[in-house]
Amino acid sequence: MYRTMIHEVFDEAERDCLSLKGIYDKLNSIHQLKARSEMLDGIPELWTDWSDRVLQIERFMLYIEKLDVFPHVIDDGTQVNFAYIIRMMELWNIWVSDFSSAFYYSPYVEQFYQTTISFPEAIESRCLPLTERSGEDIARTVNNYITTLQDAMRSRAFKEKIRHRDDHSRRMFISAIEYLDFLFNQHKRMVVLRMDFYLAADAGIGLAGPLVPLLEYFGCLREDMKRRVGVFQHLTGYIAHVEYGYQKKHHIHAIFFFDGDKVRNDYALSQLIVQRWVEITRGSGHYFNTQEKAGQYACPAIGMVHRDDREKRQCLIYVIWYITKLDQFLPYKYSDKQRLLFRGEIKHKNN
């Protein structure tokens, strides 16, 4: 395997038992990039759709997991320690009513529902919305509830689920890098394109919105890639990953690799892919084309990349790490077997 600084970080992670977030922070430091916030800075808190609220639960659990004091101080009256918890607890009733057994949730969201449904004290009727000076009985109930969630996240069973999720992200990364190594072994230079695909908010039906049609439309694009038709005539491979975010909702990060001996103009290729995406989605497809802002990235990993260009290949591996580690940012799936990572096949040339 072609080794870079990122692989050295992985060796260090194995030795020092770094968490997935710890690895990500270290990689950002290496590339002098600002890590994206995992809290709720700039994220809408009210009047969001169902998928947004599931992600809110995920962020809420991540937040309280790190708390080392009670949300309420009970001492000659009650006072609130954390305004964030006040805001989020106002959504509690909506979160609970949103539960659907039709989905497979992330470990944090699943634990929220398991703990909340079995919590012995009534919350919804007498505790919400919280005020900055709540009654002592309300404050104690909320403190007990948050403590119960924290205890659940400290359990061996929950930690095992997180370890399994992190291991899965690592395996996806290693698989993608092995695939990248294979492509460069087959081609001395490749033209690399980086794009995101998503749909208009009204493109889907039901709770999960456009996730199902998004995967179906991307399946049509993958079929074009497999058959090497149209713009994909000289495609050598691709890597794609599904993510969910507040701005783009469900979307797909994709990296395309083209034979550098046969094509040169990455921008022109990207425009043709955009045209094909809009055509497949019958106008409901949206996109983000990195090639249009190629000079704005601190870690360039697009355009012509030569097999021996260590700097660009390291940046490319960083981008692959970034998209494959995002398994933790998809707060639910339709099935426990639902694929999040897609890539081309490894086919060796005939001798």
Image: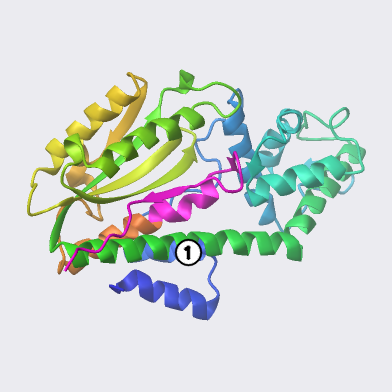
**Image point (42%, 36%), residue name:** 251
Tell me: 69 left or right of 136: left
Q: Residue furthest bottom?
A: 15
From this viewpoint, is residue 248 visible?
no
Q: Which residue in the structure is indicated by mark 1?
A: 170
Which contiguous range is marked in magenta? Answer: 322-351
Q: In the image, residue 133 lies at what x, y percent? A: 80, 35
Q: In the image, residue 325 lies at what x, y percent? A: 46, 56
Q: Quadrant of residue 278?
A: top left
Dot 1 falls on a residue whose secondary structure is helix
From this viewpoint, is residue 108 visible?
yes
Relative vertical location of residue 151 with respect to residue 92 in this rendering, above or below = below
Report if residue 330 lies within the magenta region: yes
- Report the number of numbered marks: 1
Q: In the image, residue 96 lies at what x, y percent? A: 76, 33
Relative depth, front residue between 32 and 233: 233
Report if residue 161 lies within the magenta region: no
Tell me: 52 left or right of 254: right
**Image point (76%, 62%), residue name:** 155
Q: How is the image coloured?
A: rainbow
